[in-house]
Amino acid sequence: ASLAPTREIILVGSRAPIGFFAYPNKPSKHYPEDAGITVLTAVAAGWPAWRAAGRTPVALLRGGELRGPARSIVPGTGPVALGARLALARRGRAGLAIAVLAASGAVVLLMLGLATLLTGLRDDPGALGKRYALTVKLDADRVDAVRALPGVEDAGARYVVRGADSFSLGEPVKVVAFAGDHTRFEDPPLAVGRRLRDAGEAEIGLGLASALGVAPGGTLAVQLPGGGEARFRVVGTVRALEDDGRIAYVRPDRVLDAEPGLASEVVVRPRPGADREELNAGLRSLGAEPVAVGGATSNSGAFLDTLAGLLRVVAVLDALVCLYALVQALGLVARDRRPTLALLRATGASAATIRLVLLGAAFALALPAVLLAVALERWVLAPLTGDLAAGYADLAGGATGLQALAVAAAFSVLSVLAAMRVAGRVLDEPPVVGLREA
């Protein structure tokens, strides 16, 4: 009704000022009031047009076809934020892609963690429960002389003899005897029972306990090479990896009674930061050549090295699976949002802008996948893997923090590669093909 004096009003919105033109239909005595209403209408309609024309196409498309949580989860108006919203708008599809990437990433972390564990078993004696770094062939009465050397934190006499179970001679037993508390030098995790306290007690490995059917409270009878026999009451079982767990820790009294003349060696635990050359020179001055303690024997060390390399190869192959899954997920996003990408290109978006949109979609899938992969590996896969070896040793094969950061960086690189691959296919298609589906 207020526009009755005019035949038509044309509002043109652009980056230039709004223009409006009124063509009188018939003379009127209310030109000031009519002109004011016309100006007010033009301003009310022209101001939104002015704001819209002054914004980038990406900002105009923000949330245009996106509803639900995607708009609130991903803030911002740039092409990366738009790509993230495009990927997360289809919640079921995005969740499935994230789950696949998280599972693959968790396997990569597990393989790297296990490879590090095997390398430690090969090189680090502490991984086998050994808390000393050097051994020397000296009599037990020379322990005090070794302990007095500069750079020595502790030293003790160690006796080792291999025998067989008296009731089943086909079952080998490695007997390790220390004077005093053996956990000062060898400290395998205790599985059941308690530590030994006197010369008549023994701790046995779970491998030996399983082979002989002996539990805490039972008797271990060992036939020694010299023909003597030593018997012990089992008070605990330990998770020992050495010799497949067929090992027994005892005090040396009964062993020496059954096997007179058994030679000893002295184990040495250096002080932290001690000069190793000076320590070796001091041990040589006592008439013995020091021997460095390794994590495994030479034969098993080569096997562990090969196995660690194989696990790293599996991790790389699984990373390629992640790349394939990410490319497929981005391909679905690009196909589903074909009209949006085509409209961006038709309104002047450059190839770099399209790549950034797809990169944002890739990051929206890869970032939560990395976080879930770390949680899945740390609290599910690593404990399950450790339980598989619980019969012999307490193995913690979880990935380190540095390895988790490396996997996160690898996922970032994979996101870039996947975005570039899918962007190349999108840019090869004319925009009009996508606009037909709009």
Image (spheres, rainbow, N blue to C red):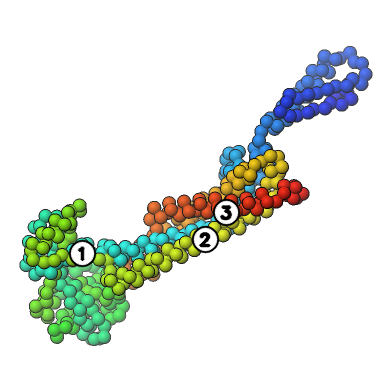
Up-down relation of residue 289 to residue 24 (above or below): below
Looking at numbered disc 1 in the image, what kind of residue is underneath it?
A: Ala
Tell me, yes or no, if residue 322 can be seen here: yes
Please name the residue that numbered disc 2 is placed on.
320
Instruction: Tell me if 140 is positioned left or right of 25 in this view.
Output: left
- For residue 27, what is the image quadrant? top right
Q: Residue at x 37, y 69 (%)?
A: 306
| Pointer 1 or 3: first along the chain | 1
Q: What secondary structure is marked by label 2? A: helix
Q: Tell me the element at label 1.
A: strand
Secondary element at tag 3: helix
Q: Earlier in the sequence, mark 2 or mark 3?
A: 2
Q: Residues within 10 Å of mark 2 (few under 14, many from 20)?
A: some
Query: Mark 3 = which residue?
Result: 418
Residue 280 percent coordinates (x, y):
14, 60
Q: Nearer the viewer, residue 207 or 340?
A: 340
